[in-house]
Amino acid sequence: MSVAQDISKQMPEDVTPEMLAKLDEICAKYRGKPGGLIPVLQQVQGVVGYLPVAVQDRISQKMGVPGHEVFGVTTFYSFFSMTPKGRHTVRVCMGTACYVRGGKEVLDRLERHLDIPVDSTTPDRRFTLEQVRCLGACGVAPVVVVDQDTHRKVMADTAVDLVERYQ
């Protein structure tokens, strides 16, 4: 069995042959180009949704870059994820202003409603719940960002209705 066949067998079920073909195309475009690894990882994560180890192994093989280098870059930068993310990312600010104005209660309520701990994804991959240090919107605290939408003065009793608007 070749290395490529072995890697393909380790792929998570949600990584389709079409995704792998696009991954191969992206890698071919950047192979041998200095500084190409980060754009490859960004684009492949955009296609697959995350960077599981099997996908990293395939990138390593296709780019001719050592696997430890691919893994090192993937784990160093916070914008890369090795676990599946939800269709919607919910970020709750835990900066000082948001915290003292009820951000912790918002986060607790969302954890209970979504039935997941912070920094994880619902089993149906609808939501990923994260806490962030500061969003720079202290005057309208507490702040919740869903995908690219910023919601101001979110209280615990309205947080569930807020996220449920995102289908």
Image (cartoon, rainbow, N blue to C red):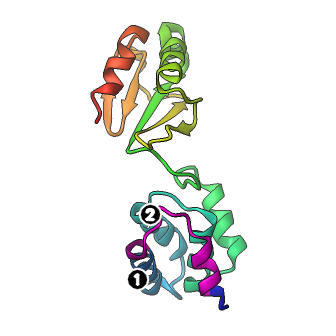
Q: For the residue carrying disc 2, how many other residues have a C-alpha within 10 Å: few (<14), some (14-19), or many (20+)?
A: some
Image spot of residue 58 (x, y percent): 58, 78
Give the number of callouts. Answer: 2
Instruction: Name the magenta segment's main secondary structure.
Output: helix
107, above or below 57, in the image: above
**What x and y, as percent, mark residue 12?**
55, 64
Left or right: 42, with 133 as reference point:
left
Q: Amino acid at mark 2?
A: Val
Q: Which mark is residue 25?
A: 1
When the figure is inspected, residue 24 is found, relative to residue 95, above or below; the finding is below
The amino acid pointed to by label 1 is: Glu
Secondary structure under the numbered disc 2 in the rendered image? helix
Pick the quarter of the image with the C terminus.
Answer: top left
Residue 66 percent location from the top left of the image = 69, 79
The residue under the point 47% across, 66% down is 15
- Quarter containing the N terminus: bottom right
> SS of the residue at dot 1?
helix
Depth check: 15 or 96 in front? 15
- What residue did someone put label 2 on? 48
Position of 71 with respect to 160 (left or right) is right
Does residue 6 show up magenta in the picture?
yes
Horizontal relation, residue 98 to residue 64: left or right: left
